[in-house]
Image (tube, helix red, strand yellow):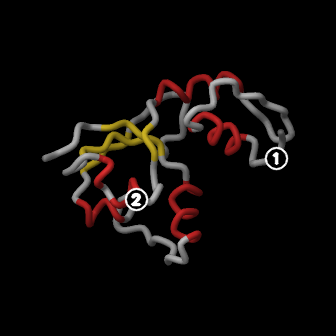
């Protein structure tokens, strides 16, 4: 049974880190698939454009099964995140060397984006 559509953000490091930790090969891009495994898994997707986020980060996917059943999801290659949550990071405009205390850090999507915007330099 197909799963419901899901809005998500793909962080480039998240695509690679789980595989490297398991000693697996780095995924190679396949056509225009942002997560190469989506092709094998039969995931349909489209890019989502918003003014406050990078154009290649956001997608709406239409999985053929529930997300929890997708190997690419259980491997941590992407996570579900509504694009509206990215607006707060855009408004914050964190810079390398800044000190940021995220008091709403669960499950951590905004915190990851803050770190990305700060080039992982800061506190």
Query: Which tag, 2 or 1, sits closer to the chain's start?
Result: 2
- Residue at figure coordinates x 63%, y 42% from the top left: 112
Q: Which residue is mark 1?
A: 121
- Residue at figure coordinates x 57%, y 71% from the top left: 20
The percent coordinates of residue 96 (x first, y second) are 81, 41
The percent coordinates of residue 61 (x first, y second) are 30, 44
Which secondary structure lies at badge 1? Answer: loop
Residue 53 lies left or right of residue 70; in this view the side is: right
Label 2 crowd bin: few (<14), some (14–19), many (20+), radius 10 Å:
some
Residue 62 lies left or right of residue 20; in this view the side is: left
Query: Of 84 and 51, which appears nearest the observer?
Result: 84
Q: Quadrant of the C terminus?
A: top right
The percent coordinates of residue 3 (x first, y second) are 22, 42
Query: Of 117 and 75, which appears nearest the observer?
Result: 75
Label 1 crowd bin: few (<14), some (14–19), many (20+), radius 10 Å:
few
Which secondary structure lies at badge 2? Answer: loop
Residue 64 lies left or right of residue 45; in this view the side is: left
Q: Which residue is mark 2?
A: 35
**What's the CA distance linking mark 2 and mark 1?**
27 Å
User: Residue 106, which numbered label?
Assistant: none
- Residue at figure coordinates x 48%, y 24% from the top left: 84
Residue at the far left: name it. 1
- Residue at figure coordinates x 77%, y 28% from the top left: 101
Location of residue 74 (image quadrant):
bottom left
Location of residue 69 (image quadrant):
bottom left
């Amino acid at each position: 049974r197909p799963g419901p559509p899901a809005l998500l953000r793909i962080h480039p490091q998240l695509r690679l880190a789980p595989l490297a930790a398991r000693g697996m090969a780095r995924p190679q891009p396949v056509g225009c698939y942002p997560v190469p495994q989506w092709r094998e898994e039969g995931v349909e997707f489209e890019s989502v454009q918003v003014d406050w986020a990078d154009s290649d980060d956001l997608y709406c996917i239409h999985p053929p099964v529930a997300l929890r059943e997708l190997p690419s999801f259980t491997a941590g290659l992407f996570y579900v995140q509504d694009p509206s949550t990215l607006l707060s990071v855009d408004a914050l405009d964190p810079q390398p060397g800044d000190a940021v205390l995220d008091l709403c850090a669960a499950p951590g999507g905004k915190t990851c984006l803050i770190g990305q915007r700060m080039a992982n330099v800061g506190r």
